[in-house]
Image (spheres, rainbow, N blue to C red):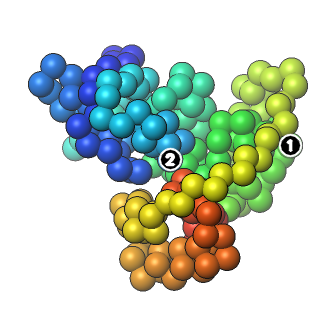
Amino acid sequence: MIDYIKGDIAELNPAYVVIDNHGMGYMIYISLSTFEVLNGVGKGATLLYIYEAIREDAHLLYGFATKREREAFMSLISVSGVGPNTARMVLSSMSVDEFEQAIVNNNVAMFKSVKGVGGKTAQRIIVDLKDKIKLVNVPLLEHKDQADNEAFDEALAALVMLGFSQQASNKVLKSLFSSHPALTVEQAIKQALKMM
C-alpha cells in the first residue's frame, strides 16, 4: 500500500498530476482542491497522500494535498453507490469543510448539485457518514474575495477532462465569466459543475 509519493511535478492539469519520483512518472488523479495547492507549487517538489484503487483492468492512484482530504475521500467511497470518480467530483465541488458541514447540516441539496449524485445517493452519504464526522464545532466558512484573472481556456479544458462536452462547458463558462470576470479557475469549475 502506497501512503504517499514525493517528487517533482512533471505535468499538471485540473484532472491529474504526473509526479516524477527518481525517474519514474506516477500519474495521479486529483481533485480541484489539490490542483489549486499544486498549482501554487509550480514545477517544484511536492508530496501527495495516496489512495490506490486496484481493479482487474487498472491500477489507479488518487492523490491529495492533505491527509484530511484523503480521509474524506475514503469516507465517501465507503458509501454504497459512491465510486472513486464520484468521490473526486464531490471533493472538486466543495472543500473538506463544506463537505463536513453538508453532512452535519443534512444538506442533501449540496450533494445533489454534484454531477452523478442523485437524491438517494445524497441521503445515503449523509446517513452513512453522519456518525463518522467527529467534529465538536463545525468551523464557519470564510468567503475569500479572489480577484485573480484565470484563463477561460484552462477551466474549459478541465471540464472537458472531467467528462463534460465542450459545447455545454463553453456555454456555461461564458455565462459565468461574463457575470463574474474575476473568477479563479477553481471557482469557475466549481460553479460550472453545479450548473451542468
In the rendered image, residue 129, in percent from the top left (x then y), is placed at 71, 34
- In the figure, 102 relative to 67: above or below? below
Amino acid at pointer 2: Leu
Q: Answer yes or no: is residue 21 visible.
A: yes
Front residue of 43/52: it is 43
- In the figure, 9 relative to 178: above or below? above
Check disc 2: other Cα within 10 Å, few if <14, some if 14-19, many if 20+. many
Front residue of 43/95: it is 43
Check disc 1: other Cα within 10 Å, few if <14, some if 14-19, many if 20+. few
Side of 35 relative to 179 (left or right): left
Front residue of 157/26: it is 157
Q: Residue at x 49, y 36 (%)?
A: 37
In the rendered image, residue 171, in percent from the top left (x then y), is placed at 51, 82
Residue that numbered label 2 is attached to: 32
Residue that numbered label 1 is attached to: 105
Q: Secondary structure at mark 1?
A: loop
Q: Secondary structure at mark 2?
A: helix
Q: Answer yes or no: is residue 118 visible.
A: no
